Amino acid sequence: MADEKEETKSRIDGILSKLKKDQSTPKSPSEPEDKDIASGKKIGQAVKDAGDAAVQKEQEQYRRQVREAGDAAVQQKRGIKTKDYIMPRQGRERPQTKNLRFLDFALFFIIIAIQYWDYRADFGRTPQLLAMFFAMYTFIAAIATAVLKHDDEEYWPAFLKHYWPAALFATLWPRILGFLFSLVPQGLGGTIVGSFSLLDILFVITTLLPVFAFMVYRNSKSFFVPYVKFWYGFWIFVTLIFIVSGQIQHIPGGTGVVFQGSNGVQEYSDFLKENFRVFFSNLAGFPSVVNVRINDSINRLYEPYFTGTVEDNKHDLQLGVYLENVKPLQDTIYPTDDKIVVYADVKAKSFTDEIVMKNTCFAIFKPEDPSIKEYARLQGEVDLDTLRIHDYESNQLVCTIDRQRIQTKDPSIKIEFRSSFNFITWGYMDMAFMERQDLFLRKKNINSQLGIPTTAKAIYTVGPLVLGMADSLNLPPNPTGIDTVNPQLPLFGVTLEAAPEYFRRGQLTKIDKLVFHVPRYMYLKDNSCNPINPSAPEQTEDGNFNLYTFTNVPVHEASLRETVRCRLGIYPRDINDFLGPGGIALTSFAVEAEYEYELTNFAFVKIAPPEATT
Amino acid sequence: MKLPLLLGIAIVLLITSCTGGGDTPKKDDPYHKGTDGLVMTFPPNVPPSSVYEDDTFNLLLRIENKGAFSVTPKKDESGNIVSDDYGVLLITTNPFYLTPTYIDANQMSINLYGKSPAYPNGDGDVQDYGFYVKKITGERESPETPILFTICYPYQTELIQDVCIDRDYYNTDARKKVCKMQDISLQGQGAPVVITQIKPRALKRDNGIVVEFLITIENKGKGNVITKDPSKLIESQCTAIKPERDDWNTLKIDAELMGRKLTCTRTELIENKAEVKCTTGDIDDRVTNDAGVVLGQARNFASMLYITLDYLYQESTSKTIKIERFST
């Protein structure tokens, strides 16, 4: 009984305190109970009559009223209409300052420009410069977060709601994809779909990273949101079409490792870990990276950068060396197996010199001993460790690795082929010269008369390196006018950098020799070359060209390209002979670059657990 | 019946006897039209579209005189050469790819008649040249290189044009005039350099008038004009040693009205166009021409204006050769 009394008393106290509050809030006239209660005359009777059910109903009704009033007040305070926010396309422009709209446009087009650049560059920077890739889009997302107009109360929840699920989805995608692949029967395209390597999928994911910035964007209150949404969808479509169908076959391992279930996730995880390791190590050395980039940018402002166009080989077989189709003999290696055997196709073509390839292979795995953090590298044996190729050769390399020397708990290991080889890339630039005054006085259609382009075009042969010869900031005019009294000639130089198709496959290790072919009446001015000077010139057999040879050209580890350039000269007394009786000289400049390049390709091999049997 | 017939014959004879004569071009003849001089073309498939390295090939070049002036030696009545006109052809190749091996014998002495009743389509010649294709240096598979042909030849633009001379500059004479002074626009005269406009003007001076012609000259061809110096050989002018050459785009003009040579200003083409002023000098009542006609006595009359432009013309054309590597 005492408990019942206490309970009844506490209820009455609660109702009394609530009623005091209710006196200050508007009441509906259709609430006779409230009036009776407010009168305070029949408290005991009211408690008794209303009971617990009535009190609960009253409290619920009260809470609803307060919530509705509160929502309306918040929206009124924010000065926007709910309909505007939900339906932005109905012609009601959101309030936004002019500056913010400019930033909207600027950011939007920057993102599109970067993506277009990625596409044009064959997504070449994605694997090797993954750290830069992550950093760039993180930076863009940060800018978007900082500059876009948004509401503090709703923006951040929306950001968290969309951004991080997207990131999580990207991370888990391989697992989901692997599961889906496992459901596709072989006869219905399972083989085709399943032949994508993990690296391919990683490409797709990393290419989709820019959508993170869009995720931020689409949750803002920007005027441009509808267009962003369109681009968002369009870009995903384009990415899937181009990346999956077009690019995959050209990337290392593109047709090698089959993505399968948990093993695939492990491989992806390894790859991701490795790249994140690179990312964080780069982050640690960020000042030096920035320094290199800044120096590179500054150098390109005052140091010439020479460009060129690759010559199209009309035959299917391109010049160069290609290491592809890395495949294990067995998909799974069992504990009882003695050896791991992996194949790789190698093709090479050269018109002139012999190519000497030195081939090695390694097994890369995480040692069983947990105290060892570094990955172990176990060298295998390649049957054709030295391959000499004249003209053209297509061959197969076989790498054999002692299985018993690999002690790891990982379900897969990486087998990497490395081929070091010498190669020669040639660059050519055909030019016409005329006496300056003659050029000025002749009719304007001189180029159509001579059948030459208006600017000199540099061509280089196919190979691991791009060899540019035309000054990108100051393309040499064609014809070039020569003053007979004080002749000034354009710079003669060359820039070497990795060709797009080799960009993520290896690196330039050494430049053995550079030979500049200079027309007979011209010369390289003494000590005018940078970074090194050539030896004394020699003449070609026909005497039409002077050959300047540069040896031991430095290769800078952190540099993306190597440039060698010189001042070109001609003696005034030689100009008439150079131009010839017709007053026009047609001539060519050529550069021969002999260098060594290291090409890599790899595959993953599954390692069955100790208890597994064949 | 005989009288009208005789009168008709007499009129015909009168008309025909008064037109043309000697080397002077006939007015409105069908050959002094167009803007072509010597024209170079390449017969199809010679050489083929591509040639192999370390091999030779021949190239044919057709040269035609599609203008009205004959690029031939000019002789006087006694057979002496008074103007040794001929054209020269210069070939330029890139020594990185090609070397000339055979040069046509007529390369430095091109003689072609212009359009005339004897050569209604102009004279033509086909020249033959041989080249050696060097082995391709380096790894390039199929480079392309132009072969440049530059032709240089003497040429003349000749014009005979009816013009009106009106001494009644201030319209004080009430008599009916036979003609009216007005600007004349022209097309081609069968040469690359064209007289495109003549603006006549009569200015009264003390005892007579001065007739002025403002003549617009344009280079309508594809090439360039070089001053012709009769005292020098054609080839030395066409291949003049630089930098002494300052004779681009200038030409010599001769104008004649009523048998009197006009005085003309320097003719220099700027942006392929020149305006020249030719004046008669004072014409007063006492002046007569070679035929004894007192010019000053006529106040309004039509006459023939003879203009000759004399120059060297240089033009280039090219043939691009694609070289194929033999061991691909």
Image (cartoon, rainbow, N blue to C red):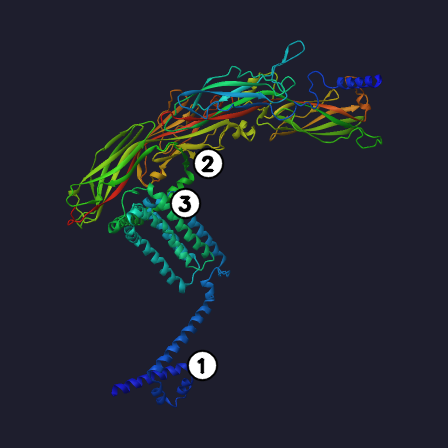
SS class of the residue under badge 3?
A: helix
Quadrant including the C terminus of chain B: top left
Q: As rendered, which of A292 and B255 lies closer to the eye?
A: B255
SS class of the residue under badge 2?
A: loop
Amino acid type at circle 2 is Asn
A102 is higher (above) or lower (below) than A427: below
Q: CA distance from mark 1 to mark 2?
A: 83 Å
Q: Are marks 2 and 3 on the same chain?
A: yes
User: Where does label 1 land, which residue?
Assistant: A28
Number of on-image labels: 3
Mark 3 Cα shell of 10 Å, populated few (<14), some (14-19), many (≥20): few
Amino acid type at circle 3 is Trp
The numbered mark 3 sits on a residue in which chain?
Answer: A
Quadrant position of residue B210: top right
Mark 2 Cα shell of 10 Å, populated few (<14), some (14-19), many (≥20): few
State the residue lying farthest toward the bottom: A41
* Left or right of residue A394, residue B80 in this image: right
